[in-house]
Image (spheres, rainbow, N blue to C red):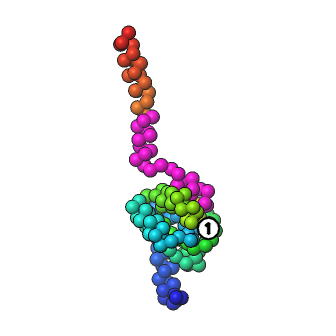
Amino acid sequence: MAKTKEQKKESLAIIAKLIKEAKDVGSIALVKFGGLTVTEATKFRRKLRADGVSYLVTKKTLAKKALAESGVTGEIPALDGQIGLAWGVDQIAPARGVYEFQRQSEKKVELLGGIFEGRFMNREAMSGIAVIPPRQTLYAQLVNVINSPIQGLVIVLGEVMKK
């Protein structure tokens, strides 16, 4: 069913507000989806929601118009196929959630690009961002790097004491 002009204006206002907020605080992942069954789409939305990411399916023309009027720097990624927007306060979570589902779903969902730190990013840049581990994992890796030399010293001193 076609949208009326008022409905299109409301949708455009919602998308523009979302993009403005993401430009200021979070990030947006532009998602191409197609061929998803209802079960797969529900699973995709649940996974995103579990990661604290919101998801909105929108018309391509409205998304292009809102992106063009957003004032975000850079070149807008090509929007092919059916478009969805995933966003969240955690800057990496939207891209990571889409990227992980993309690997599981045989390319029925694709990461087209997005907005990260107030700039448009292409597919490759957003895929690179998506593979960054979660914050807790990074903390654990840092602690391990700090702990490693100390642990080595303790082992060496323990061996010296045995002799």
* Residue 112: quarter of image: bottom right
* Residue 76: quarter of image: bottom right
Residue at x 53%, y 51% (from the top left corner): 131
* Residue 144: quarter of image: top left
Residue 59 point in image, percent of width and height:
55, 78
Asked whether residue 149 is in view, the answer is yes
Looking at numbered disc 1 in the image, what kind of residue is underneath it? Ile
Residue 96 point in image, percent of width and height:
49, 57
Q: Nearer the viewer, residue 119 or 30?
A: 30
Residue at x 48%, y 80% (from the top left corner): 11
Q: Nearer the viewer, residue 47 or 77?
A: 47
Q: Residue furthest bottom?
A: 4
Callout 1 secondary element: loop
Residue at x 57%, y 56% (from the top left corner): 127
**24 lies above or below 67:** above
**157 lies above or below 120:** above
Q: Magenta segment, which residues?
A: 122-145
Q: Nearer the viewer, residue 103 or 146?
A: 103
Secondary structure character of the magenta stretch overall: helix
Indicate whether residue 91 is drawn in magenta: no
| Neighbour tally class for label 1: few under 14, some 14-19, many 20 plus, Cα within 10 Å | some
Residue 64 point in image, percent of width and height:
59, 74
Asked whether residue 119 is in view, the answer is no
The residue that label 1 is drawn on is 76
Residue at x 40%, y 32% (from the top left corner): 147
**27 lies above or below 4:** above
Q: Residue furthest top?
A: 163
